[in-house]
Every structure is written in C-alpha cells, then in structure tokens.
Amino acid sequence: MPADALLPPAREVTARTIQVRPKTEGWQQAKDADGRPLLQFASPKRGKPPVHLADLTAEQRRARLVELGLPAFRAGQLARHYFTRYTSDPAEMTDLPAAGREELVAGLLPELMTEVRRFATDRGDTIKFLWKLHDGALVESVLMRYPGRITLCVSSQAGCGMNCPFCATGQAGLTRNMSAAEIVDQVVRANRVIAEGALGGKKAASGSTGSRTTPERVSNIVFMGMGEPLANYNRLMTALRTMVAPAPEGLGMSARHITVSTVGLVPAIKKLAEEKIPVTFALSLHAPDDHLRDELIPVNSRWKVDEALDAARAYFDATGRRVSIEYALIKDMNDHGWRADLLAEKLNARGHGWVHVNPIPLNPTPGSVWTSSTVEAQQEFVRRLEAAGIPTTIRDTRGKEIDGACGQLAAVEA
Ligand code: SAH
C-alpha cells in the first residue's frame, strides 16, 4: 500500500489533521497466505446441531414426525407450545397424551442451548445471555427494554470470520454457523424470560377499556450480535421466515421490526433484496473512503465502498425500506469532518430520502488502543451530515458495563 494511502484527499489536508491507522495491539490479527487479514466465509465442519422444528417448514415438520413413526398432526400442537408459550418442556404440554409425549418433544423440540450465564444492567432493563450450544460453542444475545419496544440483539454465527480489528467477536475467528433454529431459539428463550417477569422496567399497562393485557414479548430483532448474518445466508433466511410466519407456525413478527446488519457482502445483499421479506437493512460502513475502509473492514478488499453503497440503494429500491448506515466513531481514525462531508456526498449522489446514518461511539474491546471520538467530534460529524440533509441519529450504547454493547460480544466463560 502506498505510504500516503491513508491521507485525506488533498483538498482536506491541513496541519491539524491527525490520522490514526487501524492496527491491533495486544492480539494478533489472523492473516492469509498473502499477508492480508484472513476472511473466513466457509463454516468449519463440526457436528451438526439437532434438527428442530424451527429449522423446518410446517410441511417438513409433519414429514419429520412421520419419519420418526409419530402422528403428523401433532406438529401443529408442538409449534403452538414453542412459538406461543415459549416452552419445550413436555410436562407443560398437558394437551398431548402422556404416552408418547416425551418422544414427540424429543423428535421436534430437542434442547438447542443451555444458559451459562446472565448479566443484567440498566436496573434490569438490559440482560446479556451467554448460551452454550450442543457442541460447546458459545454465543451471546442481548435483551433490551426501550420505551414502547423490546429489542433482542441476536447472534447468527459462533464467532465471526470477518476479522474487523475493532470488534471483539472477530478476534477469535469463526467457530461455526448457527442453525436456523439456534438463531430463532434465542428469541423464544428471551420471550420466556420476559414472560417470567425477569426483564426489568414497566410492564404493559392494562387497557383502559378493561380488555385483556397483551403479554409482552420481543418486538424488535437486530442481527447485530456475534457473526456476519449474510455469510450464513440460507440459515438466516430460514430463521427470518420462521420469525415472520404467523403464529402458531412461527413467531408472527413484522419484517420491518427485524434489522439485518452486514459488513457488506454485496452479492448476498442483492439476493436479500429479492426475498420478499422486507426486513430493515443496515450496512456497517465505518469509512466513506476505500483508503481507510480497506484496513478497517477487511472484506472491503472484495467489495468497495461504492459497490456496497450501490447495493444498499438497490435494497431500498426493491423494498421501499429506508436503509441504515452504521458508523462506529473512532477517535482520529474515521471521525474527521471531511469524512462526514464525503459520506454525505456519496449518499446524496444516490438520491434523497433512502437512507439514514447511525453513528455509534466506539465501544472498548480487549487489546484495542482506540477510543471513542470526543463528544465535540461526534457532534460535528452529525452536524455536517445533517447540514447535507442526511437524517442522523447517534446510537445509544446499551450494555457497555456488561460487555454487551456493539462489538463487545466475545462469549467467554470467565
Ligand atoms: N457482522 C455484522 C453484524 C454484527 S456487528 C456487521 O458487521 O454489521 C453489529 C454492529 O456493531 C456493526 O455495525 C459493527 O461494525 C458494530 N461494531 C463492531 N465493533 C464495534 C465497537 N467496538 N464499537 C461500536 N460498534 C461496533
């Protein structure tokens, strides 16, 4: 790389511009044979997780029971228990005949993950779960109550192969893809925790008309936990279909309340746009110029800033859903005023009203010397974007105290 590769464009160079380069301290970034940051797209082979009804369509669930020599029509009852009562416990399924109940449950609702630890903060309004999968792989999810909604941040892979130097999940590489049911089970388990009253904060007020209070549950899902969802595309899609399928076949959630966040796998973004499940789409950009993004987001070696932005715009065209650009603000690395201007320029060049920007002050990760931008730099960054007509909201960083915020999920049994 040329020595000036990280300098801002000539028009912007001033004596006061400080440019910190992305480099790691305290840990070694895995490299490929050419000395570039290693990208892992293929999931290492491990024992497959047990097949679960959340991996299957309604039709396949019935077929599976037949295969096991069990009555097909029970599939619907099992789905109802799982998706509406959040239970996989045969003892709670009293509508099923006691004889054969255990077999039915073992056949379609095998245990997928055990809770290892639970960390709470924000007076119980934020809970991070550490889960152990059947093969010992560890993943995390984070449950957050906000006024008017409950959001679950889910993992799509154990570890991550995208190797972004500022994200804790990438440091250990990719352990394996999660199955569709393992992805969905995080939501079901969170719903059970909410039903048990374990999430802090206000419970839904009973209706003034005296109508029955709707039980609370996860209303929003963000794929911003461990993993790169679009690198686990088929299982992601199966999980999304189950999440939006009406109860009792699925969770009956609204696609617009589900956000898929990606580092920018362009061919997969194009595919996602064609799926007719208009989820909210978020692109982790973090730099508007290839000079910096090449080092900050290793996958930029495959798909450049402009290609990723074109794909994001095409996603809006196909779905009508306004897309989010995520931008972790890192002190003196990507938070320069000229970068805000360049970002606005690139977004406006692709039209108006199709995008908004979500800056996230960097959360600390082990072994990293970088820090979050100063409040002044954050405000200036937002001001410049807004002056250019780009709607911009700084994301609040929930769960920092429990290493549960963006980029902090490392899933270690400490
Ligand atoms: N792999 C996906 C989703 C997981 S990360 C993706 O990259 O989009 C979710 C978001 O958190 C991404 O925007 C990611 O870039 C951001 N992030 C990662 N590390 C962070 C950190 N240390 N501080 C703030 N945000 C971070």
Image: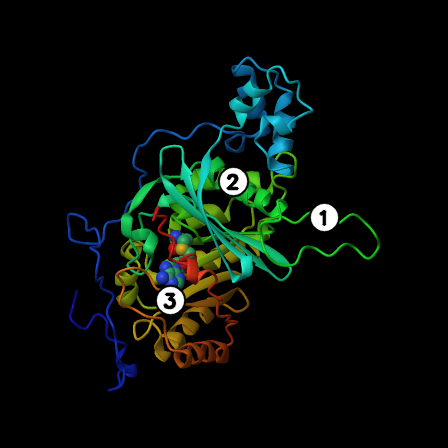
Q: Earlier in the sequence, mark 2 or mark 3?
A: 2
- Residue 345 in the image: above or below residue 363: below
Going by the image, does 53 lie left or right of 309? right
Where is mark 3, residue-wise? Answer: 362
Residue 46 point in image, percent of width and height: 32, 32
Label 3, label 1: how far apart the Cα atoms are = 37 Å
Q: How many marks?
A: 3
Where is mark 2, residue-wise? Answer: 184
Q: Are marks 2 and 1 in contact (CB under 8 Å)?
A: no
Residue 150 point in image, percent of width and height: 59, 54
Label 2, label 3: how far apart the Cα atoms are = 28 Å
Q: Residues within 10 Å of mark 3 (few under 14, many from 20)?
A: many
Q: Residues within 10 Å of mark 2 (few under 14, many from 20)?
A: many
Numbered circle sitting on residue 214: 1
Q: Secondary structure at mark 2?
A: helix
- Residue at 65% x, 20% y: name it: 73
Label 2, label 1: how far apart the Cα atoms are = 22 Å
- Residue at 22% x, 56% y: name it: 27
- Which kind of residue does numbered mark 3 sit on? Leu
